[in-house]
Image (cartoon, rainbow, N blue to C red):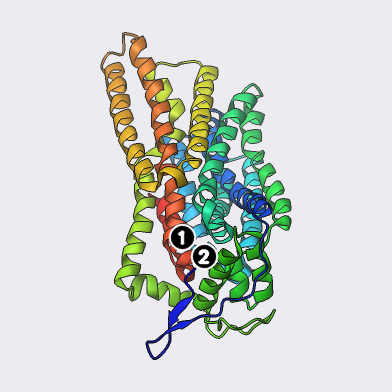
Amino acid sequence: MDNEKLNNNGVVAKVQLPDIPAPDKAKTKTYAYACAILASMTSILLGYDIGVMSGAVIFIKDDLKISDTQVEILVGILNLYCLFGSAAAGKTSDWIGRRYTIVLAAAIFFVGAILMGTAMSYSLLMLGRFVAGIGVGYALMIAPVYTAEVSPASARGFLTSFPEVFINFGILLGYVSNWTLSKLSLRLGWRLMLGIGAVPSVFMGLGVLYMPESPRWLVLQGRLGDAKRVLVKTSDTKEEAQQRLVAIQEAAGIPLDCTDEIVKVPKVEKGHEVWKELFLHPTPTVRRILIAGVGIHFFQQASGIDAVVLYSPRIFKKAGIVSKDALLGATVAVGFVKTISILVATFFLDKIGRRPLLLSSVGGMIVAVILLASGLTVIDQNPEQKYVWALALCIAMVLVYVAFFSIGLGPITWVYSSEIFPLRLRAQGTSVGVAVNRVV
């Protein structure tokens, strides 16, 4: 345990670590897992929207008699709206806390889902998309930040990948919703598909009542005693809890020998000061961190994953699947493979490491998308003939593509970007990464 620091005279001195009770390791893992799951459930909101929209637009277009351009805007505009939510989430989470930011995200999305589910016109549907997009932006930013701040070091990579797990689970739920509700009338079916998205928000709002607040936020509010109790519940050992508390206290400028329950915080990073450090006057280290954290979000979306998932019914239709039931069934297979793959990846993040999984993921995606493009080209150039092998190749490569994405680039983006930023920059830095993720 490193409890030696340089004093003002440049002399190495022993630092008195704060007195913290020894945690129960078995209870720690259970408690940390429960907190990570509840926080990461906010990511279901984005996943469900992506999955359900891919099938719902088939029925929305027929019911509202809208053009292809309007369909494209309807599907893609959520990413722009997410930008506003994620940009505001960093400051909001520092103001009201991580926990209540999750409640806010769930409440906003709930309103958006209800508006979409009851929309009788294209303009009202777009209004619902706007509100839901703000909620999704909040959710995407806060889940990895909260999870990283409450997770023990031994399971941080595993637990921080949970947002991506729940995005995939949400996509699968969206696909299943499409397939199940497609049998209803045209006017009712797609509205239920979108309106049901409000249900997860209710469970999240209730579940958050059982979650603790982030220990970092508690310390920044001067609630040192509460922060200690949370760290005891979310650390593997007494030494780890002490080290985590020391790091937070140092970042907040609280003397390490302070043992009061409630303390005065002498130095709190103001929002505008954090933004200045990130963009106006970054040190070389902060600049590299920002480029890496934002860059991985950029390349995750530049890979085209959202296009493949959102437009998988169109890809399958282009490949030769005509029946709506068959199209929706094929998309359910995409969601299933994506979800299973991400579950496998979570168990290897801390064992194999981020870099090997990331390189394997990108390599597999490149091969899959090249073969998919080849199959679609053969079908497009010979419209009068049916190539069963080309159809099978296209379906297989879509499944392979999403599988390789889910074993590396999908979960590692959220894990890496939430781990790399120092505590004082984490909320705002992560919000910038999420904003880039949704804009690309």
Total count of labels: 2
Q: Is residue 318 visible?
A: no
Residue closest to the far bottom: 9
Eyeballing the image, is 261 above or below 87?
below
Q: Are marks 1 and 2 in contact (CB under 8 Å)?
A: yes
Name the quadrant containing residue 373: top left
Percent across and percent down for residue 259 are: 65, 81
**CA separation in Å, label 1 and label 2:** 8 Å
Q: What residue is shown with label 1?
A: 430
Task: Tell which of 2 and 273 is nearer to you.
Answer: 2
Question: Foreground residue, 183 or 257?
Answer: 257
Would you name the residue on which mark 2 appears? 90
Q: Which residue is at 58% across, 75% downward?
A: 220
- Residue 83: x, y in percent? 46, 56
Residue 398: x, y in percent? 40, 27
Question: Disc 1 on helix, strand or loop?
Answer: helix
Residue 200 visible to the viewer = yes
- Residue at position x 45%, y 58% in the image: 419
